[in-house]
Image (cartoon, rainbow, N blue to C red):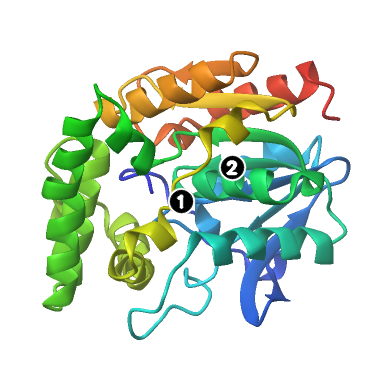
Amino acid sequence: MAADQRPVHALPPHAIGHVVVRGATLPLIDHGAGTPVALVHGTLGGLHDWLAHLPALAARHRVLAWSRRHHAPGATPADAVHYTMAEQSQDIGALLVQRGATPAAIVGHSYGAYVALHLALAAPPLVRALVLCEPPVLPWLAMMPDGHDDWAAFERNALQPAALAFARGDAASGVARFMEGITGRPFALARLAPAVRDALMAQAPALHAELATPRGDYMPTLDAAAVARLEIPILLVRGGRSPRPFQLLMDRLQALLPGADTVTIAGRGHDMIGDVSGFDDAVLAFLSRRDVT
């Protein structure tokens, strides 16, 4: 899931390569030296989400950032393809192995954090540390006594209206309804700067694919007991202004992982990575503190 007011940075062609991963050609930046740090974007996101973070992070680490399968500026689907968590997770693992970048510290934002957590459970040797920025593990929310109503409201007010909009060919409304759900406030594409609006709409085909895929395939239930058994360094990052569903899910993760480090990015919502210096400082401090160097 993406930030609604993030800066959009031009993609410098000379800095971007491509890697073929399990049949998909993915735009990739692989920059810096040291412990690999992989940056995994969320829904309605892409490689550009991380460009502003590269100078600080790559000054101390080898940083890999790419657009996931089905996301621009890579190939986006002309029709709603089957979009699964398993495929996205396997792509990350294959990319890291192919680039000789394992084990890696994986920094995931929103759905990217969900995928990163899935990979840590499925292929532990590939993951050295995790930075999890509000993974939307909605099946957990649905099972919480104090979260079921929030889950139902998110389904009713965001996911279902967005899916219906895409089904009738109205991608702009689909994006807007989805963004209202993750920001917790009214959302109008027309109010965005053209570059920000264009960046969001470039990812609309991927969002359409997500919403058209059976929920259990792209938002599977993760084994909470297995999450609690993770022994790698973990940083949990939340936005101080994030809507209640994300706060509840972060509370759940914090309860499962009492040894994890935590940080709140004050003044930001689900778009906490938009506070570039605050976010980078928190990530770098965590990696240094936990000897992920």
* Residue drawn at x 18%, y 60% as measured from the top left: 162
Q: Is residue 44 at all visible to an observer of this figure?
A: no
- Toward which corner of the image does residue 16 lie, by quadrant? bottom right
Question: Mark 1 against mark 2, which lies toward the viewer?
Answer: 2
Q: Secondary structure at mark 2?
A: helix
Q: Whole-percent x and y of residue 168?
A: 11, 77
- Toward which corner of the image does residue 206 lie, by quadrant? bottom left
Q: Nearer the viewer, residue 141 or 191?
A: 141
Vertical arrangement, residue 198 with respect to residue 102, above or below: below
Q: Which mark is residue 284?
A: none
* Residue drawn at x 79%, y 21% as measured from the top left: 288
* Residue drawn at x 64%, y 50% as measured from the top left: 119
Residue type of the residue flagged with mark 1: Gly
User: Badge 2, how many Cα within 10 Å: few under 14, some, many 20+?
Assistant: many
Q: Is residue 217 left or right of residue 173?
A: right
Q: Nearer the viewer, residue 266 or 254?
A: 254
Q: Whole-percent x and y of residue 81?
A: 39, 79
Q: Is residue 242 left or right of residue 218?
A: left
Q: Is residue 35 left or right of residue 144?
A: right
User: Badge 1, how many Cα within 10 Å: few under 14, some, many 20+?
Assistant: many
Count of marks overlaid on the render = 2
Q: Secondary structure at mark 1?
A: loop
Q: Whole-percent x and y of residue 80?
A: 33, 79
Q: Is residue 118 at all visible to an observer of this figure?
A: yes
Q: Label 1, on which residue?
A: 42
Q: Nearer the viewer, residue 146 or 158?
A: 146
Residue type of the residue flagged with mark 2: Leu
Vertical arrangement, residue 249 with respect to residue 138, above or below: above
* Residue drawn at x 56%, y 62% as measured from the top left: 86
Q: Whole-percent x and y of residue 137?
A: 41, 41
Q: Earlier in the sequence, mark 1 or mark 2?
A: 1
Q: Which mark is residue 117?
A: 2
